[in-house]
């Protein structure tokens, strides 16, 4: 059995969102070194502010400033900070109830070690030197043993309010395709395509999944399929991807390889995009050193009859 593969994988994208009046005022306030909360009808002050009362669902709009000092309500020590976290050295994640607030704000606490952190300790905000209207305008919290700092009384009215934010989402992890797909990838290196047959329904799945998605039983019997196949469905791509050096428009299709009971996807080349059609017979085109087919091109055979692939749409 081939070695089970694994490799690092990164999923990353920017998420852009607009802000309502409450969140806009909160982030603009941070830019101005002001922390705003929102008042509820029963007298609570929520920090960070929200637009609707989490208890009554009542709309909230009354903003008021709270102090930059507060009390740690709970915490957890972070031994190994990751990329993009507030501090590059070990720190504590803390929930801090700022003076004047009834809820706690999550952020980092700069402390020399876990022995220096405790529930109930007093802290204050350390502001970032450069502030843009984001939660990172609070660089972190730091221990504080001075007198309480009174709030300034801001009502949330600022010039040049922050209207939107861009949050960069990123997930780094190690991916392993498992036994079945490791064998599939190993076969591709030899320009072969293999699937696995279900011992119950006898369908051949490509790429293999290690289990039949219909019957739920394990699969182990390898079956070589293709190399030719039939286009079952397709789409025309008109927007160029940043990481693909392919001119648009081009066609991406589901292709049912001969002998397979599940269609895989691939790019169609060697034919004008507007001549690609359901039933088109295609074969793989490999490049030197390629680990998988670069694209599929027409074989020149007559189109497949719809009845032969209708169950694979």
Image: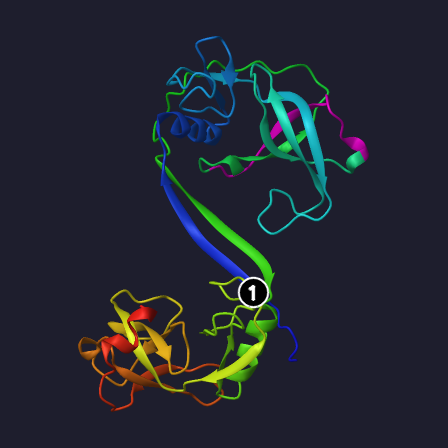
Whether 230 is among the magenta residues is no
Residue 205 lies, with reference to residue 143, above or below; the image says below
Determine whether 150 is above or below 128 in the image. Answer: above
Which quadrant would residue 185 be assigned to in this image? bottom right
Q: Is residue 125 magenta?
A: yes
Answer with left or right where residue 123 lies relative to residue 131: right
Residue under the image location 44 percent in, 24 percent down = 50
Say which residue label 1 marks: 217
Residue pictured at 31% horizontal, 72% vertical? 252
Rendered location of residue 16, percent (x, y): 38, 45
What span is in magenta? 115-131
Horizontal side, residue 202 vs residue 306: left or right: right
Q: Residues within 10 Å of mark 1 (few under 14, many from 20)?
A: some
- Where residue 219 sits in the image (x, y, percent)? 56, 71
Rendered location of residue 98, percent (x, y): 59, 20
What residue lies at 44% left-to-right and 31% top-to-bottom? 27
């Amino acid at each position: 059995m081939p070695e089970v593969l694994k490799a690092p994988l990164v999923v990353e994208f920017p998420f852009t969102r607009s802000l309502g009046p409450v969140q806009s005022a909160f982030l603009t306030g941070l830019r101005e070194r002001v922390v705003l909360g929102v008042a509820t009808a029963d007298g609570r002050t929520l920090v960070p502010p929200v637009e609707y009362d989490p208890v009554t669902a009542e709309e909230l709009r009354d903003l008021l400033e709270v102090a930059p000092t507060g009390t740690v309500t709970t915490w957890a020590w972070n031994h190994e900070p990751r990329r993009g976290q507030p501090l590059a050295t070990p720190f504590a994640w803390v929930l801090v109830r700022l003076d004047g607030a009834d809820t706690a704000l999550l952020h980092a606490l700069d402390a020399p070690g876990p022995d220096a952190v405790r529930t109930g300790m007093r802290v204050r905000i350390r502001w970032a030197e450069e502030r843009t209207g984001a939660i990172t305008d609070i660089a972190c919290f730091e221990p504080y043993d001075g007198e309480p700092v009174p709030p300034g009384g801001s009502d949330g009215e600022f010039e040049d309010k922050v209207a939107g934010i861009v949050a960069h989402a990123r997930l780094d992890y190690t991916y392993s395709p498992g036994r079945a797909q490791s064998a599939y990838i190993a076969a591709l290196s030899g320009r072969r395509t293999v699937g696995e047959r279900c011992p119950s329904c006898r369908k051949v799945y490509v790429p293999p999944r290690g289990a039949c998605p219909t019957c739920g039983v394990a699969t182990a019997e390898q079956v070589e399929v293709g190399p030719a196949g039939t286009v079952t469905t397709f789409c025309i791509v008109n927007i160029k991807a940043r990481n693909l050096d392919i001119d648009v428009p081009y066609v991406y299709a589901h292709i049912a390889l001969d002998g397979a009971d599940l269609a895989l996807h691939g790019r169609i080349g060697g034919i004008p995009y507007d001549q690609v059609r359901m039933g088109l017979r295609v074969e793989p085109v490999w490049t030197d050193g390629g680990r998988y087919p670069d694209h599929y091109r027409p074989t020149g055979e007559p189109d497949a009859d719809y009845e032969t692939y209708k169950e694979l749409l």
